[in-house]
């Protein structure tokens, strides 16, 4: 199959190593996701009256509303404070996930959607499959 030559140099020996590497990366990613789910990431509104806690994967776990917020804020302001706290916690969790991905890829910059190094090979395989 000529479209596979780009992966293995044409000799067929590159595929086992490619599959082993994909397996290692998948295992490492699964480990990171398990650890992320166990992490607790706080975020607060600007005044610190509402604190939200999310998991490292950004699942909302807890919201704590300070007594000052109950006394000083009306229902609209309180709702906004809760949203701000949840947003801050989720942004912190997202930063943690970005760092985890950085660890997985050896600290290299994360590629954009058009930077997929396998993209041109996958496109060639799909074009050939359409012709076949």
Image (spheres, rainbow, N blue to C red):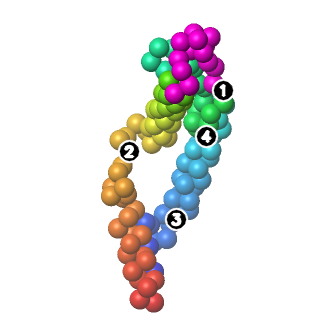
Q: Give coordinates of residue 94: x percent, y percent.
A: 49, 35
Relative depth, front residue between 56 and 8 = 56
Disc 1 from disc 4: Cα separation? 20 Å
Comes first in the chain, label 2 or label 1: 1
Nearest to viewer (mark 2 / mark 1): 1
Comes first in the chain, label 3 or label 4: 3
Q: Is residue 70 left or right of residue 121?
A: right
Pointer 1 and pointer 4: residues touching (CB < 8 Å)? Answer: no
Q: Is residue 3 left or right of residue 31?
A: left
Residue drawn 51% across the image and 59% down it: 18
Q: Quadrant of residue 116?
A: bottom left
Q: Which residue is mark 3?
A: 15
Secondary element under disc 4, as helix, strand or loop, is helix
Identify the disc placed on residue 62.
1
Q: Give coordinates of residue 14: x percent, y percent.
A: 48, 63
Disc 2 from disc 4: Cα separation? 18 Å
Comes first in the chain, label 1 or label 4: 4
Q: Which residue is mark 4?
A: 33
Residue 75 belongs to magenta span: yes
């Amino acid at each position: 199959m000529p479209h596979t030559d780009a992966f293995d140099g044409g000799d067929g020996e590159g595929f086992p190593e490619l599959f082993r590497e994909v397996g290692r990366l998948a295992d490492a990613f699964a480990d990171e996701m398990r650890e992320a789910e166990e992490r607790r990431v706080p975020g607060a509104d600007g005044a610190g009256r509402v604190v939200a806690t999310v998991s490292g994967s950004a699942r909302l776990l807890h919201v704590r509303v300070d007594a000052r917020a109950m006394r000083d804020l009306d229902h609209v302001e309180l709702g906004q404070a809760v949203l701000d706290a949840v947003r801050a916690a989720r942004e912190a969790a997202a930063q943690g996930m970005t760092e985890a991905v950085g660890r997985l890829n050896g600290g290299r910059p994360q590629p954009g959607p058009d930077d997929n190094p396998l993209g041109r090979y996958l496109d060639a395989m799909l074009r050939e499959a359409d012709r076949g």
